[in-house]
Image: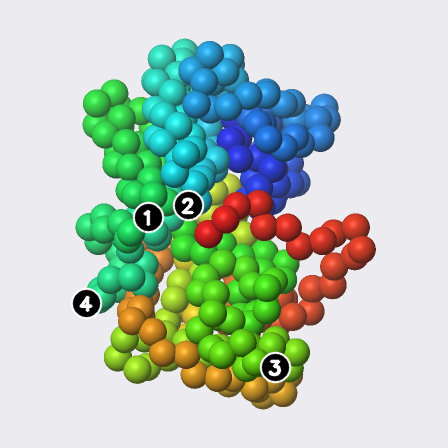
Amino acid sequence: MLILVTGATGKVGRRFITGLLDEPKFSNARIRALCHNRMIEESDRIEVAKGSIADSAVVAAAMEGVTHVLHLATCKETPDDVMDVTVKGLFWLLEAFRLSPTARQFILIGGDAGIGHFFYRHDGPVTEKTPHRAYPGCYALSKVLEEVMLEQFAIQYGINSCCLRAPWIMEKDDFKFTLSFGDDVFGGPDWKSLVPPADAARYARDGTVPLLRDADGRPLKRNFVHVDDLVSAVLAAIDNPRAVGQLFNIAMDRPVDYGEVAAYLARTRGLGSVDISSEYHSNWMDNSKAKFLLDWRPVYDLEKLIDSAWEYQRSGEEPRIVWYPG
């Protein structure tokens, strides 16, 4: 088994490589990491291919002898790159995969941006049958195009494909910084821009967290997944006959409720909260299909997500780095 991993230096790629190499049933598996801007350390089971997935020759060379592909490489709100990397790159990968005599399975990590997550109202749980609806911006559009392209290649050429659709992926202390009123906020909303500057500075100093409310005035529910749970789903999908041609929602059992977050942090850490109104909509990704077909279960619930983020201690050699905008 030789697995080509794109986006291997990101949070999911690194954790997947560690998880795969540690899993006894994949003891004979090797990794080929396709790296562009950043590199990964090689070993007896890890080799590196260098170049951009937007280059068909690079992709063709990287696919030599590959049995499985885990496609993680993506762009955020970077219009200059998104079509080359996300659309053209995936096209070249799929073309090389379908023509390969060794290729057996193609796994794509999709995203809830493709169904609009909290930008649009959903009348019920978000399932794998929920229609694509990209919110404004190039990133959400790219996630729709990825899923549709993979689906069409399976229809056109009968390739063995699987898409694992993930919401916002957390690791280490990420979740703590999603709630920061400071310049160190991870992702969006940018809380400090929603309150007066003096209040933002005080909230950041005191560790106050936002209690985001949805368009109906209730605490907003938003989907997350921890990287460990996503990786366990990938490992469950590899060579699984029940994953052939399937799309799975891979998310926590319950979405994060900002009211429950505020209450838990007040009870366990004495932190205050402040209401933030919004026009966003609560939503709930249903992960039942993955549980049923992959026999997969997420380990992280709300309390574990919060506790692990607040208890994580970074060393001086591990500064927080956000590798992409948005």
Name the amino acid type tagged 3. Answer: Arg
Q: Is 266 or 272 nearer to us in this picture?
A: 272
Question: Given contact means CB atoms under 8 Å apart, are the residues at marks 4 and 3 in contact?
Answer: no
* Image quadrant where residue 82 sits: top left
Q: Residue at x 66, y 54 (%)?
A: 320
Is residue 260 visible in the rendered structure shown here? no
Q: Residue at x 22, y 64 (%)?
A: 122
Residue 37 placement (x, y as % from top left): 59, 31
Residue 140 placement (x, y as % from top left): 33, 47
Against 6, residue 286 (above or below) is below
Name the amino acid type tagged 2. Answer: Glu
Q: Residue at x 43, y 70 (%)?
A: 256
Dot in front, 2 or 4: 2
In the picture of the structure, the residue carrying the numbered disc 1 is 137
In the picture of the structure, the residue carrying the numbered disc 2 is 77
Q: Is 41 or 241 nearer to us in this picture?
A: 41
Gap between marks 2 and 1, in whole Å? 7 Å
279 horizontally vs 269: left or right: left
Against 90, residue 235 (above or below) is below
In the picture of the structure, the residue carrying the numbered disc 4 is 123
Name the amino acid type tagged 1. Answer: Gly
Name the amino acid type tagged 4. Answer: Asp
Give the secondary structure at mark 1: loop
In the picture of the structure, the residue carrying the numbered disc 3 is 202
Residue 134 placement (x, y as % from top left): 27, 49
Give the secondary structure at mark 4: loop
Q: Earlier in the sequence, mark 1 or mark 3?
A: 1
